[in-house]
Amino acid sequence: MKEFNSPEDIRGLANSFRESRVLLTAFELKIFTVLDKHMMTSSEVSGKINADPRAADRLMNALCAMGLLKKVKGKFYNADISSKFLVEGKPEFMGNLYHTSHLWNTWTSLTDSVIKGSSFAGDQNKTEKEEWVEAFISAMHYRGVQQGKILSSMINFFRCKKDAGCGRRFGCFFHGNC
């Protein structure tokens, strides 16, 4: 459990949403993917993501301050950590952050939900619900792959005669006994 010892600790917690929102916005806009293996100005990036150049520059400078981007002579590029985990198509891409981004909306309405005794999910339209479900499935897939690597090293499959399988789109099923 985190311990708070000062007003600064509490203020730090209250303000921690800012960095989270900067990361999630950059992730949603696919800035890390656009920058993959490139050095680009914020104007070039804003053109590729259809964003306001001035706002994109502010966002990208904030990402530099957070250590997720680097900047040399007005051109931005991914930090190593961003290149590894935040670029779509890379083996360790953290696609689960799409679900985190969807959760942002849910948690943003927490005060109203507590007052009304209702959930955010009821306020979503059909498209939002479908996007939420897809992002949730991706998050579970990402987590399952990470945990699967650990579990597979712990289980002895030597005596198994039939296999177990999972499919991202089809759910999990079991074919036989070990």
Image (cartoon, rainbow, N blue to C red):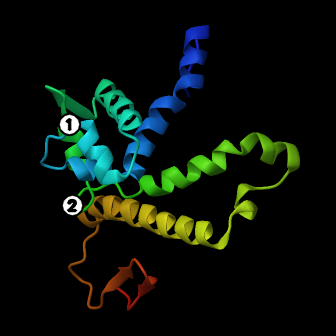
Kind of residue indicated by mark 1: Ala
Residue lying at the far right of the rendered structure = 116
- The three-letter amino acid code for the residue at tag 2 is Pro
Occupied quadrant, residue 89 = bottom left
Side (left or right) of 13 relative to 119: left
Above or below 18: residue 99: below
Q: Could you tell which of marks 1 and 2 lies nearer the N-terminus?
A: 1
Residue under pointer 1: 79
At x 82%, y 55%, the residue is 118
3D distance between C-alphas at marks 1 and 2: 17 Å
| Residue drawn where x is 38% and y is 81% of the image | 167
Q: Which residue is mark 2?
A: 91
Residue 31: x and y, percent? 31, 47
Mark nearest the camera among 1 and 2 is 1
Left or right: 160 with respect to 10?
left
Residue 90 placement (x, y as % from top left): 21, 59
- The front one of 166 and 17 is 17
In the image shown, does 82 or 61 lie closer to the viewer? 61
Q: Is residue 83 above or below residue 76?
A: below
| Residue 115 appears in the picture as rendered | yes
Image disc number at residue 152: none
Instruction: Please name the residue shown 69% across and 63% down the image.
Output: 124
Q: Position of residue 107 (x, y in %)?
A: 65, 45
- Tell whether 69 sits left or right of 1: left
Question: Label 2 crowding class (10 Å Cα cut-off): few <14, some 14-19, many 20+?
Answer: few
Q: Name which residue lies at 40% across and 77% down.
A: 168
Q: Are marks 1 and 2 in contact (CB under 8 Å)?
A: no
Q: Quadrant of residue 19?
A: top left
Above or below for 10 versus 133: above
Q: x and y percent of residue 29 in the render?
A: 39, 51
Secondary structure beneath label 2: loop
* In front of the other: 55 or 29: 55
